[in-house]
Each structure stands twice: as structure tokens, then as C-alpha cells.
Amino acid sequence: MSDYMPKVSNAWNIFTYFNFAVAALMMGAGIWSLEASFSAKGYYAMAALMLVYSTASITKALRDKEESARIYNKLEDARTERLLAEASGKTDI
């Protein structure tokens, strides 16, 4: 069994935060300068916020699914190793 956990560099984290800040600033400036009624601007702002939230939720759900599959596979590997050890006569596991 491997306990491989991919590492993400600090530079990548800074880059992603910077990209998010720039995109949020650009969206906010675009909505602010839009020639539309206040309610239309509010609608677009709420849609942008909901899009950001749903993207974060999907990312978290996919990550949680992958982590749970990894834990399940570790448990199955441990059970298989125990079964093989019992079948071969080793009991010191």
C-alpha cells in the first residue's frame, strides 16, 4: 500500500488565489459599469456568486469522493492482506 499524497506547490496556491481575485474584480467591475437597471445588476451579481459557490461545491464533492475511494481501497487492501496471511498460516499481522 502506498501513502502517496500529491503535493501542491505554494506558488500554485498563490497563482490560483490571484486568478480568483482578478476574475472577481473583473466581474464586479463589469457588473458595476453595466448600463442596466439596479435589479438587473443585482441579478447578474447573484448569478456570479452562485456560480462561484456551485463551482466550489462541485470541487469539494469530487475531492471527497476521491478521498473516500482511496480510504475504501486501503481498507480492502488491508482485508486482503489479512486474508492472505491467514490462508498462508502467518498470524503475526
Image (tube, grey):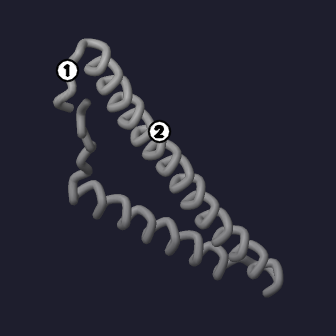
User: Which badge, 1 or 2, comes first in the chain's sequence?
Assistant: 2
Q: Which residue matches tag 2? A: 69
Foreground of the two, 43 or 6: 6
Foreground of the two, 40 or 7: 7
Crowding at mark 1 (Cα within 10 Å: few <14, some 14-19, many 20+): few
Q: Please identify, in this view, whether the residue under mark 1 or under mark 2 is nearer the observer.
A: 1
Say which residue appears at 50% left-offset and 65% top-offset.
23
Crowding at mark 2 (Cα within 10 Å: few <14, some 14-19, many 20+): few
* Mark seen at residue 21: none
Image position of 51 (left or right of 12): right
Find residue 48 and report its horizontal and vertical position in percent. 66, 68
Secondary structure beneath dot 1 equals loop
Q: CA distance from mark 1 to mark 2?
A: 29 Å
Foreground of the two, 13 or 80: 80
* Mark seen at residue 90: 1
**Quick check: 48 above or below 35?**
above
Say which residue appears at 52% left-offset and 71% top-offset.
24
The amino acid at mark 1 is Lys
Say which residue appears at 47% left-offset and 45% top-offset.
68
The amino acid at mark 2 is Ala
Find residue 26 and report its horizontal and vertical position in percent. 53, 70
Foreground of the two, 46 or 44: 46
Image position of 72 (left or right of 62): left
**Quick check: 72 above or below 64?**
above
Find residue 62 and report its horizontal and vertical position in percent. 53, 47
Find residue 1 and report its horizontal and vertical position in percent. 25, 30
